[in-house]
Amino acid sequence: MTALNASRIALHALGRNKLRSALTALGIIIGVGSLIALLAIGHGARAEVEKQVASLGENVIQVSAGSITKSAAKLGLGSSGALTVEDAEALKEEIPDAIAVSPEVKIKTQVVAGNRNWSTEIYGNSPEYFRIRQWATSAGEIFTEQDVRGATKVAVIGQMAADQLFDEDEDPIGELIRIRGVPFKVVGVLAVKGASASGSDQDDSIIIPHTTAIRHLIGKQTGLRRIYVQAASLDVLPTVEKKVGELLRQRHHIETGSDDDFKVRSQLEIAESATATARTMTVLLSLIAGVSLVVGGIGIMNIMLVSVTERTREIGIRMAIGAHRRDIMRQFLIEAVTLSALGGVIGIACGTGAAKMLATLAQWPTLISPDAVLIAFVFSAVVGIFFGYYPARKASRLDPIEALRYE
């Protein structure tokens, strides 16, 4: 018996019991649909996190102030105040593959523009910060190195801050804002950046020269919050990260074995940490959907065993007129795979529709991967083969004489 004839007989047998076949395939449909939808949610969440990490820029290393202990209490990262502008300058001068360095200070305070006010984050950075973060302006321009050297009172504001401080039809460029009573001229408005990997709104910020922030808003006694370093390429990123740590330990006179008063993290580490949760969620959701597929496969095995019992006399007649055991086995195996594959196709369509509906109605980020669709379909076919093998084998091993006697 050819595979074509076996397929035709299998489809005819399934067509005789349409309702039973549909109910049997339902388990596979639910399993595959769940797998597609849940993987789309997991991949969407992961892609969103990766997008937020990518908003940091390319080949970025963050050097954060470390922790200090006061009255036996560890005050957490950022409390040491050990990082200085001189450290940032040394990193730029002494590490050849560090192509851009920006020291950063930060305060959160009330900002006033005319009769409007808004509480936002104020960052003191260098012009290289915008290059490191790949952050362009939607209007105006960024401040310059000359502004940094002269501690000029100029500001580049995020889109959220601009929306809160100025009317929709008002151009912020050239307008004055007051930060802690100090007037600043707005020279640029940043393009929309979105949320960061930590979930904070990057557009709700105002960026000024770090020298201006230290001289007029914070005071020289305060250390840097962070230093941004950009490596020349991804290949040299680990080397630059290592050299940054060695140079800062040398400058801060930290002995071997002692705790650092700073923390160095590359963009790769940040990405790995940020996507770990999303990756774990994707795996768990896949396992849940996999259980649904296994349950669907058990349903196929159950129905195929029933079908073998019902068609025992038919099997005996086929064997009596010359059908081989492999023909009988192929026939029942094709029935199981057809049920499973058909359920897989319908399940893919249902899962894709469910993912798109979630993205539209619930505003969840979803991403339907072609690989996930292929894996789901192949897995559904494998389920049919795995759970259909035993009933098919049982059918092929029936004794023709006993099968013909069966009522």
Image: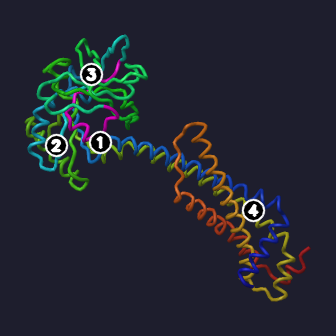
Indicate whether 105 appears above or below 14: above
| Circle 3 Cα neighbour tier, 10 Å, few/some/many (<14 / 14–19 / ≥20) | some
Residue 107, which numbered label?
A: 3
Residue type, numbered disc 2? Gly
In which quadrant of the rendered view does residue 344 lie?
bottom right
Q: Are marks 4 and 1 in contact (CB under 8 Å)?
A: no
Specify which label sits upstream in the sequence, 3 or 1: 3
Residue type, numbered disc 3? Ile
Indicate whether 287 appears above or below 358: below
Mark 1 sits on what residue?
A: 134
Q: Nearer the viewer, residue 180 or 251?
A: 180
Residue type, numbered disc 4? Asn
Q: Residue at 50% x, 50% y: name it.
A: 283
Indicate left or right for 147 with 119 as reference: left
Give x and y (percent) for residue 334: 71, 73
Q: Could you say whether the residue bearing mark 2 is in a helix, strand or loop? A: helix
Give x and y (percent) for residue 211: 15, 26
Q: Could you say whether the residue bearing mark 1 is in a helix, strand or loop? A: loop
Q: Which residues are magenta?
A: 119-139
Specify which label sits upstream in the sequence, 3 or 2: 3
Give x and y (percent) for residue 78: 24, 28
Q: CA distance from mark 4 to mark 1?
A: 59 Å
Residue type, numbered disc 1? Gln
Q: Residue at 61% x, 66% y: name it.
A: 382
Q: Nearer the viewer, residue 228 or 241?
A: 228
Indicate whether 181 appears above or below 383: above
